[in-house]
Amino acid sequence: MKRFKGVFTALVTPFDESDGINESSLRKIIRYSLNNGVSGFYVCGSTGEWPLLTVDERKRVLEIVKDEVKDSALIIVNVGCISTKFSVELAKHAESVGVSAVSSFPPIYYKFSFREIKQYYFDIADSVNVPLIVYYIPSFTNVEMNIDSLLELLEHKNIIGVKFTSMDLFILERLKSLTDKIIFNGFDEVFLAGLSLGADGMIGSTCNFAPEIVVSIYDSFKAGDLKTAYIYQQRLNKMIRDILEFGVIQAIKEILNLAGFNCGNPRKPLRTLTSDKRTKLLSLIKEWDIKLFS
C-alpha cells in the first residue's frame, strides 16, 4: 500500500472525428502527465466518461494506457457497473492487463441496501488478486455511507483504500485516523485540506492540463512549505472556478484541444461548447500561466 501515494491523473477519454477512442491523443496526454511528475493514472473514471463507454471500449482504453505507461507509474482502473457480473468481468480483464489496483463506485439506480453494496464490493475483491479501492462519490451516485460503513468495507483484506470524492472532510480525517488503509482526496479544490487531514494523495481531473500545479501542492506540503502549497492551491482553485461555468468535462477537453491534443468532444448527451464559450474559455486560459500554453 505504500506505493499508492502522490498525484494521480483522472484521465479523460479522447474521441476522434468518428466518436471512437483516439489512441494517439490518449498516449500524448499520458506522456504529458508523466513528464510533469504524476505518480499514476486513474482510468475510466468520471472524468473518463465511463457511463458513456461500452465495456469493450473500457477494456481498450485500459490496454492503451498500460501499453503507454508500462511500469513507469501506477494504474488504477474503475471497473464499476451496476451489475456485479460486468464489474467482475472488467476486474478480471484489468488483472490480466497488469494494473496496480481496480476501483469501483457503489452500485446505483436501484437504491441497494448497504448489505447489497458490501456484497458487491466483496465479490469484486474476491474475484481478483489485485487490490480494490472503493470509489466514494455520493454527489454522483446518491449513495451516502457513514464512517462505520466505510470502515466495514475496509475490513476486507483485498480492499486497500478509498477514493474519497466528498466535501465531508471530517469523514476523510476519521477514516485516516481509524485505519491504516490508503485514502485518496477526490475533489481537486480541497486537495491541500485533504492532505492536512491525512490524505495520502489525490486523484484529480485538473491533472490532465495542469499536472505541474497539482504536483507542486503535494511536493510543497510534503516539504513542510505550507505557504507555497497554499499559493499553488489558490492558483488551481482559480482555474477550477473558471471551468465550472462550462462543465468540467467539456472544459477540460476543450483546453486540451486548444493545446493541440485533439481530444474531440464529450459524448452525447453531454453538450459541446459553443464558439462563444470556446472564445471565453480561451481568454480565461491566458490568465492561468500553465506549462500547457507556455
Image (cartoon, rainbow, N blue to C red):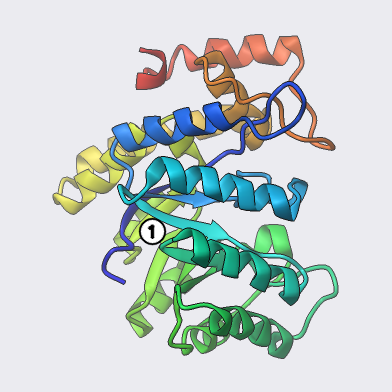
Q: Quadrant of the N terminus?
A: bottom left
Q: Is residue 21 visible in the rendered structure shown here?
A: yes
Residue at point 55% right, 50% down?
Answer: 62
- How dense is the environment of label 1, judged by Cα within 10 Å: few (below 14), some, or many (20 and up)? many
Q: Is residue 51 left or right of residue 178?
A: right
Q: Residue at x 45, y 82 (%)?
A: 158
Is residue 260 left or right of 176 when viewed as pictured? right
Rendered view: 27 above or below 275: below
Res. 168 in view: no
- Front residue of 40/203: it is 40
Determine whether the residue tagged by mark 1 lies in a helix, strand or loop: helix
Q: In screen coordinates, is 109 left or right of 146? A: right
Q: Is residue 267 above or below residue 283?
A: below
> Residue 107 in the image: x percent, y percent?
73, 72
Left or right of 137: which side holds 170? left
| The C terminus lies in quadrant | top left
Above or below, 42 relative to 112: above
Q: Position of residue 198 (x, y in %)?
A: 32, 66
Q: Residue at x 28, y 63 (%)?
A: 3
Quadrant in which residue 178 is drawn: bottom left
**Horizontal and vertical percent for residue 206?**
48, 37
Residue highlighted by disc 1: 194
Q: Residue at x 38, y 58 (%)?
A: 194
